[in-house]
Image (spheres, rainbow, N blue to C red):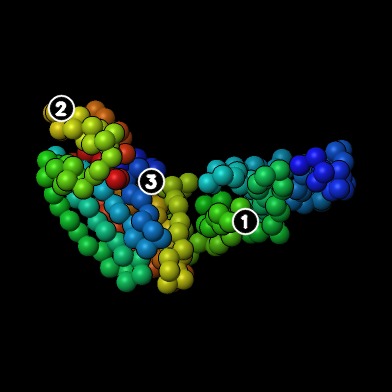
Amino acid sequence: MIEEQPDEYSYILVNSFVVIYKLMDISINIDLVDLVAEKAYKFSYTIYDYLKGLLDVVNDEVEKNELLTCFHQDISKTLKLNAQHCFGILKI
Amino acid sequence: MLINYIESSRPRCKVAKHILFPKVSSTNNYRPLSHDVKQFCTSTIHITHNKHYDVHQSTLYYVTKDVIYYHKNMSTSIKSLVPLYNYINGKYLLLRAGTNYESASVISDTRYCVKAPNGNVYVIYVRWHSRNKKALCVYNLTKDEIVHCVIYSTNSLR
């Protein structure tokens, strides 16, 4: 259930977009709200595919290691127990 | 550095003996003032208001870099204020929220805002959708309309 702090589930991207996360059991839904056009685009990934996609994009070694840590653990368990930590990574 | 120090005149300042605390009404001395405090970005915004007059009389101020900024008496509550922080001069532009944002289901103190390149101001906030559901909404403050909402229920992890 969402807590009362919106910045834990969303963040503003270059003053033009709002990225909103929603974690389901095996998937992650991302709503990208274009503020200028006032349109919302929905994306849905499995958590594995999402982390894999991030790994392909990220160059920083520290961030790569953080993502690999998520991979090596039981992902759903990780997200439940340490969702805040993983959300910090997913904001990359 | 030493030469510059000698050449520059010493600043004329003195320690303040008294700080004027905002007063809501001079005629109503027997009722205690309420004091709402909310942290926004780097500053804490204070509103003092009189419960008796409720929203009719209030005084708002905030402190940034040892300077107290007062705003004129505003007939508003802290929930209906939307602060837009200017990172260049460190001041707030305090905006009045629209009717959609001020609905009873909005959870107070759960918002942040941004000014988009199209000139409109947007607020992101959380509100109750139903008993087991909350919604994270993007709201256009300039047009007073909701742009997009994502509903979170007990089925979703977060």
Chain letter behind tag 2:
A
Mark pair 3, 1: CA separation? 24 Å
Q: Residues within 10 Å of mark 1 (few under 14, many from 20)?
A: few
Secondary element at tag 3 = helix
Secondary element at tag 1 = loop
**Residue at the location (29% across, 45% down)?**
A92
The residue that mark 2 highlights is A73
Secondary element at tag 2 = loop
The mark lying in front, picked from 3 and 2, is 2
Residue B107's spot in the image, x, y percent?
A: 42, 48
Mark carried by residue B89: 1
**Residue at the location (24% across, 56% down)?**
A31
Chain letter behind tag 3:
A
Give B12 or B152, whichever is nearer the viewer.
Answer: B12
Residue B82's spot in the image, x, y percent?
A: 52, 57
The mark lying in front, picked from 3 and 1, is 1
Q: Residues within 10 Å of mark 3 (few under 14, many from 20)?
A: some
Q: Are marks 1 and 2 in contact (CB under 8 Å)?
A: no
Q: Quadrant of the N terminus of chain B?
A: top right
Q: Amino acid at mark 1?
A: Asn
